[in-house]
Image (cartoon, rainbow, N blue to C red):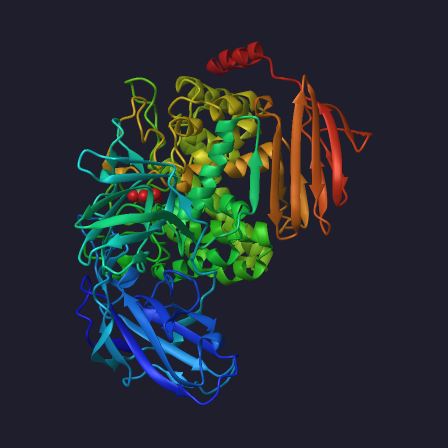
Amino acid sequence: MVRPLVDKGVGTPASFVAKTFTLDTVSGAEILDITALGLYVAFLNGKRVGNDVLTPGWTAYDARLSYQTYDVGSLLVAGENRIEIWLGDGWLRSQLMWGKHPIYNTWGSEIAALVELRGRAGDADPILVTDASWESGELPIRKSGIYFGETFDARIAPTVSGATAAIDFDHARLVAHETTPVRELDALTAVKTWTDAEGRIVFDFAQNVGGYVAISVAGAAGATVVIEHAEVLDKDGNFYNVNYRTAEATITYVLKGQGTETYRPHFTFQGFRYARVAITGDAKLVDIKSLPISSVTEQKATFTSGNKLVNRLFLNTLWSQRGNFIEVPTDCPQRDERLGWTGDAQVFAGTAAYLGDVQTFFHKWVRDLMVDQREDGAVPHVCPDPTRMQPEFYPGFYGSTGWGDAIYQVPWQLYLHYGDTAFLKETLPSMIKWVDFVWSISDGPIVSPPREWGARGFSFGDWLQPKGPSAKPLPTIGDDAAATIYLHIAAKQVAEIATIVGDTASAARLGKMADAVKTAFASEFITVSGRLAYDDQTSYALAIVHDLIPADKYEAAKGYFKNTIDRADRRIGTGFIGTPALLPALIKIGEWALASEVFLQEEVPGWLYQVKMGATTIWERWDAIQEDGSIYNPQMNSYNHYAYGAVCQWLLEGVAGFRPDEKDPAFKTVVFEPRILPELSPVNAEHDSPAGTIRAAWTISGEAVRYEIEVPAASRGVLRLAAAYRDATLDGQAIATGQDAALSSGKHVVTFNYAAPKREERQKSLVNANTP
Ligand code: BGC
């Protein structure tokens, strides 16, 4: 590995390392292995190597560094060749973590490159390696940073001005890039353009993305183009990015002054829908485009219904996944975070695995999570974890229930979707350490997390629950109940995983632990009348979905649960961990109409409110823009946060009605169990699963439902119609509802009658629930 001696450290001009070398012959089979400390862009004889961006990617660099391999035969010539590698600060050393206590040089202060050029794949002896004979120089990139953006002075040509030094590097850290590198998606053009009072031009690309702009400009040498980014406009229609906090997210391009110049940033990306362009000096913007980037480039699922807002919600989720699956699953792509928040990933992983092929993407991230996991089993809040490297201002930045659970929840989703037993095996020891850590916080079945940030076992609880409809606050789940429920979920799930991989001793131990937590939960958090101690939507939703309510209290608890929704004016009252459970819980207790009402709510808080307000990605907060168009609390307000988009898993599994069977994963068996929400008719969904394409579509006319499905060629299907549905037929033959019917591969037509729950009945059951 060599570092450019011209490099002056973080925040200073980027530099390159280069070497001229001679080849007698070129076979065309030449292979280049390449990586860097920092980010790199490589050129052979002036031509870009590959089309990947933000390489070598982002990992827990101190333990694992990805390298890429490129076919470069077509870029080489017999005779003299030149390789030049541009290096930028990237995640390695540009600012990470928020403004109050930014961290620089997280994994090191030196940028460097490592290459090996071989005559053909597998050759033992490379024909070129990085050593101290390489030279170095400064780049036109005067400054770059993930949050900062990039400043590029095109008047400066990369010229050699210094030497390089070989640095110690342990090759055992190298891993072949485990997932597809980040790539550019199709460019978006502006749909609207205007000039503001200061003469700056604002472009609206109509879609919030993670990516960057590409520009063409013409003008005089030294003229400057400054581009800022924003996700939203303020109440009065002005460009607004206060919510980026200390992320400057600005691109500055200084013209060379020769013809039409084209430029796109090299070592940064932004989260944006709008670009604001200010020009100083004599220059004209010839073209500007938005270039979304993502690690997950192919869409694997679609969902449409008779409700346009719902359809857009699905698309918004897809775009939030694209913009936040940039090397690691991040919370957001715009402000001074863009971190691999574990809680967000764990609630969204099940949705992500439908929308894209995320198997290798998550392998890579979970392996980093295992590196970042602390000795005592605590899983960090974010991964790769800058605070493990520099804990000073972030002591105890790990160990929150609902967040650390990513360590088993993500591999579990990979098992369901891809049948990935090998990965369960690889990660099981880390999962067990996590469960034991949570148990150890309180040394027993009831977990009582401390309130103070940084204290051992701190929990985010049900992060970002909305306020209630009136000035009087609604009950909120306590951290103790949230953490105890999560200990149960974790112990039970990891016990099941241990069974699958054949670790019977752990399975038995954790199974017992799960039972002990369940019993303790019932005595500590459920009253004699069946009311949950915190009496909020999240408590009931999680307890119902995870079977934590004893049979003799179930009926009463159902009533109380419905009351929590009524109290909130039939609107959602859950945060990050409660939200994915809310609609499945309502469906599980047979409250389809109520689930539908909550889901289709167009007022705040509700999924469709943001769509109505013009969102093109999923918001972090239910009320990120107020009804009058004003922006809510820009100190923590992202317009591209996928967590609440986890409802798309429910749209596919609950409404369109298909899901993998955990007994026979990877869609080798597909379970079809649709829930008819008449307001959504007609529903059409597809998933390009590892087993082949799955389709499900239904329409309702009066009470008659027609459900058309397709089982992939090598799969089996199971049809499970709710007992409340009547007069069912499968391919023309009468079948019983309330029990399984086998489905062969191929297309099937199912018909049945749907009896709408009568409104009066529901009202009555609510009254009953009040007096259990
Ligand atoms: C992040 C999250 C995260 C949360 C945890 C926020 O700043 O953006 O999405 O899960 O903190 O508290």
* Residue 344 position in % (x across, y down): 39, 44
Q: Residue at x 34, y 25 (%)?
A: 475
> Is 201 displayed left or right of 327 in the figure?
left
Outermost residue toward the front? 259
Snapshot quadrant of residue 67: bottom left
Residue nearest the viewer, comparing 577 with 329: 329
Tell me if residue 79 can be seen.
yes
Rendered-image quarter of ligand 1: top left
Tell me if residue 449 can be seen.
no
Residue nearest the viewer, comparing 46 with 619: 46
Outermost residue toward the right? 733
Residue 73 vs 39, above or below: the answer is below
* Residue 123 position in % (x across, y down): 50, 84
Residue nearest the viewer, comparing 576 with 278: 278
Q: Residue at x 27, y 84 (%)?
A: 132
Q: Residue at x 36, y 42 (%)?
A: 447
* Residue 62 position in % (x across, y down): 32, 68
Residue nearest the viewer, comparing 453 with 263: 263
Residue 743 vs 507, above or below: the answer is above
Residue 435 vs 52, above or below: the answer is above
> Is 592 displayed left or right of 397 in the figure?
right
